[in-house]
Amino acid sequence: MKKLFLITALLFILPYCTYTQFTSLPVRLVNSSGEPLTGQAANIEFTKYPHNYPADLVAGLSVTEHGTAGNYVARGFSSFQYVKLWLGGVEQTWFDSVLTGNIFSWLSSNYVTLGTTQTITGSKITSGNWTASSTGSWLYSGSSTSNTFYKPYIINSSPWYSDYSLMPTTALLFRNAGDSLYLKREFVYYNSDDNKLYFNTPGLLGTFRLAKRGNGQLFDMNSSHFYWSPETGLNINSSVFERDSIAAKNFTGIKDTSWNVLGEPVSRYRFLSLKKPFWFNPLPFPDWKWYYKSVNESGVINARDSFTVMNHADNTFDETPFEIFGVESWSDCDTITLPVRGLYQLTYSLNLIFPYTEVSGIQQRDSAIIRVVNEMFVDIPASYSEEWKEFYDGAVYRPESKTVTRTFTLFNSVPNTKYYLQLYGILNTSLVNIAVTKPGMTYLLVR
């Protein structure tokens, strides 16, 4: 009942005097009978626009009562803004909005004056000409990423406009640079008369030629494969096309008694040939084969066989964002696509940060599990790795980084299947975070 009476009484408080002091604000409180209202320093509050209580309360204020006549001073107004008075959580409608705060810092942030050294920040739009004195300089300050010159212009009365020899080494590019001895305006266009490369020819951007004035060779090359002509440029030697690119050299083996255990006669010749098949190759890389042929002393073929030589490797690295956090569900770290059906050796590696941030005061065991699954989310048991850590109360654990890698065998029965490297965090406490950086996957196809 005492609280309700206080709020009711405050509704009848009349102002004695209120006026802006910018950073401080004096207020005198009297009741409906004109008697001073004392002991209300803790109940005096102010709100800023849009004056929703208590969301818009002005923080950092101190209210001091002076004497016993109901005089109070509120100090600590820093932002330049209008405020309203609240007493015991009740808005005082008789109190007009008062402008408070440091007007000088506000003016310094929003306005500049001429004749003083001031910093102008933010994007500004100006009109008219900016004129620098003949003895002054335009200075560049800051880093290369925070300052930008946009479309620099040199007036045609400048001596640089037509004579680049007058330019200092630190000058901006002049307007007639396009007509100098450096480059022509016609870019990327080939002139067959003088065997020269130009750049940026309008309408001919798709016809690129590389050449050089004179008869000199443009770059180093293997003369057994290529030759240079001043008229036609780089050419392939015709002898390259005359070679047999299908069959490799035959290697004749020696007589070896150890082959007798394989069921073949001891006296024979053996040939191993590396060949590339004539027919369609479904692989994105060369499909070479080893051919074996066994011939006896009389030249009769006793045995033959062949097998594919397929040691192809590929990898992918960090396709997802830089940090992948392990929560209590599987998170994708990286992907890789196996191109054809075959036997693969799959390797993954990642940088495990466990814990990710400093923790203390816990008694728990947390784990990080890594696995590989296919696009149907069927996991590969051989791919599982688990890292765990015991946390003890009274100890401080700082971020710790560890490289985790695993290699396992996989038979891929469906071509062009995508596989995912995933992370799962078993977090028994919300204080521990687990993260993965720099994930990578590599496959080796052995067929």
Image (tube, rainbow, N blue to C red):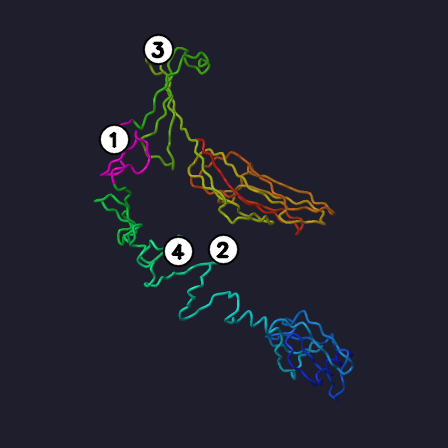
Q: Tell me which numbered mark, 3 or 4, is placed earlier along the sequence.
A: 4
Residue 251 in the image, given as x and y percentages of width and height: 37, 19
Residue 416 in the image, given as x and y percentages of width and height: 43, 41
Question: Label for residue 143?
Answer: 2
The magenta region covers 214-243
Going by the picture, which residue comes out furthest to the front?
A: 135
Mark-to-mark CA distance, 3 and 1: 40 Å
Q: Tell me which numbered mark, 1 or 4, is placed earlier along the sequence.
A: 4
Residue 212 in the image, given as x and y percentages of width and height: 27, 41
Instruction: Assign a secondary structure to mark 4.
Output: loop
Question: Label for residue 238?
Answer: 1
Q: Tell me which numbered mark, 2 or 3, is placed earlier along the sequence.
A: 2
- The residue carrying pointer 4 sits among few (fewer than 14), some (14 to 19) or many (20 or more) residues within 10 Å by Cα, namely few
* Residue at the disc numbered 4: 171
Q: Nearer the viewer, mark 2 or mark 1?
A: 2
* Residue at the disc numbered 3: 297
- Circles 4 and 2 in contact, beta carbons < 8 Å: no
Question: Which of 144/223 is in front?
Answer: 144
Q: Nearer the viewer, mark 1 or mark 4?
A: 4
